[in-house]
Image: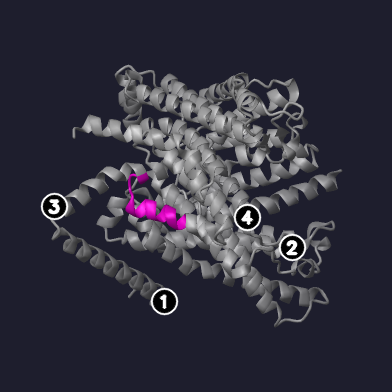
Amino acid sequence: MTRVSRNGVLAVLAIVLLLAVPDIANVTPLSFSIIHQGILFGMAAMGLNLLLRHTELVSFGHTAFFGAGAYGVAVLTAHYEVSNGLLLLLGAALAATAIALLVGYLVAGYLDIYFALLTLAFNQVLFAFVLQSGFFNYNDGLRVRVGADRPSLLGIDRWLVSTFGADPIVAYDYVLYYLTVVVLLVMVAVTWKIVNSPFGRALDAIGQDRTRARFIGIPVDRYVWIAFTLSGLYGGIAGGLFALLQLHVRPEPVLFVFVSGEILFMAIIGGIGTIVGPIVGGIVLIYLLRLARFYFEYYHALTGLVLLVVVFFLPEGILGSLPTFRAGLERRLRDPTLVRGDAATVSTTIRQRLYRAATTVRILVFGVK
Amino acid sequence: MIESLLTHTLNGLYYGLILFMIASGLTIIFGVLGILNLAHGELYALGAFLVVTVVGFLAGFVAEPTGPLSALVFGVVVLLGSLLAAAVLLPVGAVIESVFVRPIYEREDVYQLLLTYALLLILVDVMKFLWGTSPVSTSSYSRLNEIPTTELVGFSYPSYNVIVILVGVVVFAWLIWFFDRTKTGRIVRATAINREMSTAIGVSTDRTFTLVFAMGAFFAAFGGAMNSIGPSDAYLEMGLDPLVLSFVVVVIGGLGSLKGAFVAALLVGVISRWTVGVFSLPQLELAAPFILMAIILLVKPEGLYGTWGEIE
């Protein structure tokens, strides 16, 4: 099979899997709502990855946009009684874009840790502002409802209820999920387009060497600003959908700085070199952080161990390491003697690590001669 | 009016110096190893929990303070206890560095962040396992306050806060002395400035890095110990805010500069107490350090002082 057709088959498989999630969740103990949340956070991570992968800028403040999107929806429903889902999402996108434009303008010239911490600072200022503002109803947050009604999703959910007599809540959840899938597919396509455009290449150049990029005539700061705003827009749309899913927006789950960290880590877990890796990372991390607590008391440590495994054994992230894995597996299938070599490598590594740990302890206890 | 201004300033200094102790650890780790240690807040929390156990144990050996003198004895015991609790973090820090952090120096920054985040999560559950989920406290705060301060500062003020301010200044002075005057300190600085060159003249960078990480862990834990002897309890989520705030401090001061971290910690401490006490803007308390940081970075992108190695 050629490479292109194999990728095509994989893509079709992924889409079928995505469409079948509600049914899969029905017949297995997987949680539909958690997967949905994971996809939404993964979307934000995908936006962040646009910045991380190409310009190598680490943003610690990406919940600012996720939160702006969520609060955009919440404010429109709670204060202006808008109930059209499309309008609400538009509001979310606009709110996030506006904030991303402002923050991006201020931070575009910064690098490395300064960039990371400046974005964190703006995120935290926004968080503190929302937390202390009566307009946003402080820590209690806003309900995403007009009266007692859920927002309407293009009228499809209402239509399902009136024609087929579907349960309104189920209909709403399903329609919202498929809406999410459509948005996600559009996002993936757009990202693919951006990444393979001259603009994407220019971002790559900026990530590799700013000075060189400037010399070959790339307006570095403006491009970073545009990329930042784009990634903010992704986060905003994801946040808007999240608000529609949760129907209640509170500052902590959508604006707190540690959620920013989670979004960043989703991108890394999934694989920053891939386009859809962050979605996988999003589902995995949300599962570990939100759901594992019901099954396992020390779920933090469990998450930590999974992350350690990613760091040490999957250096390109879950999705990014798959090709290497597959290649290695194929080689071993063809030549089974290689396995013995692997076992030897593993045992030497373990022996070396133990020896080093012992040396460290010895130095700590007895000092150095 | 003046007295209230003084009280709030002293509160700010107290808060700032605790921040400095945490941030100094973060600063030296970042300055020498180039690692932004997200688990630093949990090392701080670990110090806070440890001090509850250690001081609780030690305080059983001394009598309840009745007069100034016995209160002083009690104070010394508590201080020794917190040093001891923080010292536990020396081997812990060394093991974390040599086992987990050492293999990833060459990797991209984001993986270092992910690794230290993983350590943060694991440490949280280690503390949950050892001390449970409910807050714990040493309850030695009120007894420490029996050391009279009225003579010391001229008006009534919790003497515990004064002790912390003095300890913080001593920590700063010791750090400056260590990095400026001792041979080990100079070796660490040399490694920070030029890794290859110091390896060439025979410095073992591995050992230096382990030492620095252990030191950083020690000061984080000492900050936590100081905080949890005071009126606040040790609780599981306590590491988050100090971690973020010590980032702020480190960045305002200029990455890795000890003097910068000192000045920035005091600035952050005093300003955040003033927003509440003097300007009566409690709604700005959360945001004040971040607004300060944003302004300083926008005006002076390198922070207030230079970078590591050149202490001055």
Q: Are marks 2 and 3 in contact (CB under 8 Å)?
A: no
x and y, in percent, of residue B111 in the image = 39, 47
Residue indicated by mark 1: A365
Q: Is residue B214 left or right of residue A247?
A: left
Identify the residue at image location x=71%, y=48%.
B12
Is residue A85 within the magenta segment? no
Q: Residues within 10 Å of mark 4 (few under 14, many from 20)?
A: few
Is residue A313 within the magenta segment? yes
Stretch of the chain drawn in magenta: A304-318
How far, Cα to Cα, is label 2 from label 4? 24 Å
Residue indicated by mark 4: B237
Q: Which element is circle 4 on?
A: helix
x and y, in percent, of residue A344 in the image = 20, 66
Report the chain holding disc 3: A
Q: Amino acid at mark 3?
A: Arg
Q: Is residue A172 left or right of residue B258?
A: right
How far, Cα to Cα, is label 4 from label 3? 51 Å
